[in-house]
């Protein structure tokens, strides 16, 4: 069964999410941006969500995490919680 590890940044606003993505693309550290801006408790650990299987996260996460290239920032991804930047750090299919 598939397994993935990912990290994310959760914010309330799409425009701010896009702004953070631009900063990361420009060289800012994903983990530092998560610590400074994420509304999720995982922000304290750089946005690390650990390892999980399909169905353990919201469907919008699964769609990205189990198909996106590794180590590339994806998003904004909208869920009921807000807007996310996601980075898949590992995956086993």
Image: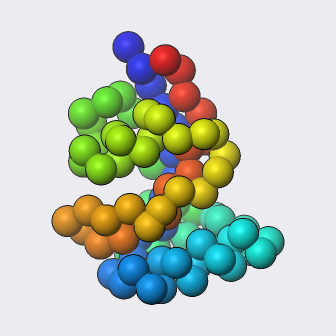
Q: Is residue 83 above or below residue 72?
A: below
Residue 86 at x, y percent in the picture: 50, 56
Residue drawn at point x = 68 percent, y = 79 percent = 23
Q: From the viewer's side, name the closer residue of 26 and 52.
A: 26
Relative to residue 34, is residue 64 depicted above or below? above
Residue at 64% across / 64% down in the picture? 31
Residue 33 in view: no
Q: Quadrant of the N terminus?
A: top left
Identify which residue is drawn at 33% across, 81% down. Answer: 12
The total of numbered circles placed on residues is 0
Frontmost residue, 70 versus 5 = 70
**Closest to the observer: 44 or 56?**
56
Q: Residue furthest top?
A: 1
Is residue 25 at all visible to an observer of this figure? Answer: yes
**Identity of the residue drawn at 44% across and 67% down:** 76
- The quarter of the picture where residue 88 lies is top right
């Amino acid at each position: 069964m598939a397994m993935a590890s990912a990290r994310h940044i959760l914010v309330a606003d799409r425009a701010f999410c896009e702004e953070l993505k631009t900063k990361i693309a420009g060289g800012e550290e994903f983990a530092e941006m998560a610590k400074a801006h994420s509304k999720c408790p995982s922000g304290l650990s750089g946005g690390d969500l650990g390892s999980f299987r399909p169905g353990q996260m919201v469907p919008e996460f699964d769609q990205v995490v189990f198909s996106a290239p590794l180590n590339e920032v994806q998003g904004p991804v909208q869920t009921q919680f807000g807007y996310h930047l996601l980075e898949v750090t590992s995956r086993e299919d």
